[in-house]
Amino acid sequence: MVYRRDLGYLQEWHCNSRIKWTDLGPDYFPRYLRSVECLAENCWFNIYKCRPKSFTVKVLKRKRDKCIIAGSGTKTGISSLPKELKELWVWEERAVNFCCDCTN
């Protein structure tokens, strides 16, 4: 004879979450970052906590207030490029939540 567990029992280990989009603004590429937000604080009969798991991504940030002087003989770009592509861009690291885990 096969016994099935109640679906509610299995859901106790599950942390509900929702997708959240963050607008970093026009000085970032990509401008929008997708992450996950945990909806519940507790899980598994309120013994464990729902905690976000994250990883780090690199995004480009435009530095409008900085000007870099190129050395002689340095190729600086194509004159037909739009102004925003000629500005200084630097890498910046951001933490992005990708799931919620039921953990202690």
Image (cartoon, rainbow, N blue to C red):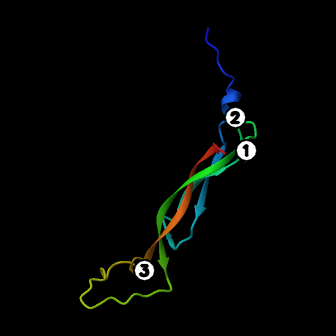
Residue shown at the point (59%, 61%) measured from the top left? 22
Residue 79 position by quadrant: bottom left
Give the percent coordinates (x, y) of residue 53.
Answer: 58, 51
Mark 3: amino acid: Leu
Disc 1: CA contacts within 10 A as few (<14), some (14-19) or many (>=20): many
Left or right: where 72 falls relative to 41: left
> Residue 12, labelled with which disc?
2
4 is higher (above) or lower (below) than 83: above
Residue shown at the point (64%, 18%) measured from the top left? 4
Residue at disc 3, secondary structure: strand
Residue at label 3? 88
Residue 78 position by quadrant: bottom left
Work out which residue is located at the far front of the displayed protein and give it.
104
Left or right: where 80 falls relative to 6: left
24 is higher (above) or lower (below) than 45: below
Spatial CA distance of label 2 from label 1 is 9 Å
Residue shown at the point (40%, 87%) measured from the top left? 68
Mark 1: amino acid: Asn
> Residue 42, labelled with which disc?
1
Spatial CA distance of label 1 from label 3 is 45 Å
Left or right: where 48 falls relative to 91: right
Residue shown at the point (66%, 36%) measured from the top left? 13
Q: Nearer the viewer, mark 2 or mark 3?
A: 2
